Image (cartoon, helix red, strand yellow):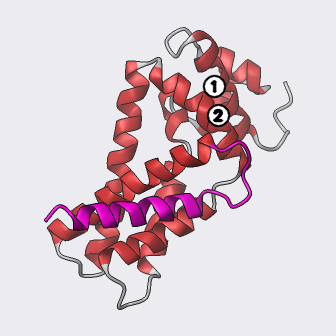
Amino acid sequence: MARWQPGARERLVLAAVDLFADQGYDATTVAQIAEKAGVTKSTFFRHFPDKRELLVAGQQTLCRLLTEGIADAPEDAGPLDAIAAGLERASSAMGPMNRELGPRLKAAIAASTELQERDALKSVGLAKAMTDALLARGVPDPLAQLAAELGVLAFKRGYATWMELDHDEDGLAPHVLTALADLRTASASLG
């Protein structure tokens, strides 16, 4: 197996999602994932501690981009404007591979309780990263948590819209920002 080829991490994620969708998460082994990706099992374990972690392969990067965007928002930006800056930075970094992977990943998650639980933990991690970034800006705790939860919901809604499109001309960011604007309007009517 060619260990020198670049992109092993990405190939492992794609291979795993395909196998999870085709034969189920529980029936898929690390050896099968490695073989389909054209790497050894030891290469798999250099990138991931176990097959569950494949689902959150980009979570650290996503959290970093969200928090950097929030931190870099203008000083006078309100909590949701800071969240918008974080969402824009993070979603602008997502490209065709993320879009291609989305429907297959969604199918794999829907078919496995363990993957559904892991996906829920991913959402918790994103909300915590955004909450912490808002707290660092001086936003009070309950407000920071609420804005972060709206940010997670906007990201999910925008991503779902992006997946439903026949073609992608604008990328993910406009859909996420539209979802956040819709949520902002909806929350104003909660009264």
Considering every residue shown, the one lying at the far front of the view is 189
Q: Position of residue 7 (x, y in %)?
A: 77, 43
Is residue 42 part of the magenta span, yes or no?
no
Amino acid, disc 1: Ala
Which picture quadrant has residue 91? bottom right
Which picture quadrant has residue 28? top right
Q: Position of residue 140 (x, y in %)?
A: 17, 75
Q: Which residue is mark 2?
A: 13
Q: Position of residue 32 (x, y in %)?
A: 67, 15
Kindly state the secondary structure of the residue where label 2 is placed: helix
Judge whether residue 43 can be spotted in this image: no
Left or right of 71, for residue 144:
left
Proximity of marks 1 and 2: CB atoms separated by less than 8 Å: yes
Q: Nearer the viewer, residue 19 or 4?
A: 19
Q: Which residue is mark 1?
A: 16
- Look at 39% across and 70% down and name the residue there: 83
- Look at 40% across and 43% down and name the residue there: 122
- Look at 63% across and 61% down and name the residue there: 93
Looking at the image, residue 23 lies above or below residue 49:
above
State the CA–CA distance, disc 1 to disc 2.
Answer: 5 Å
Quadrant of the snapshot with the C terminus: bottom left
Q: Which residues are magenta?
A: 165-191
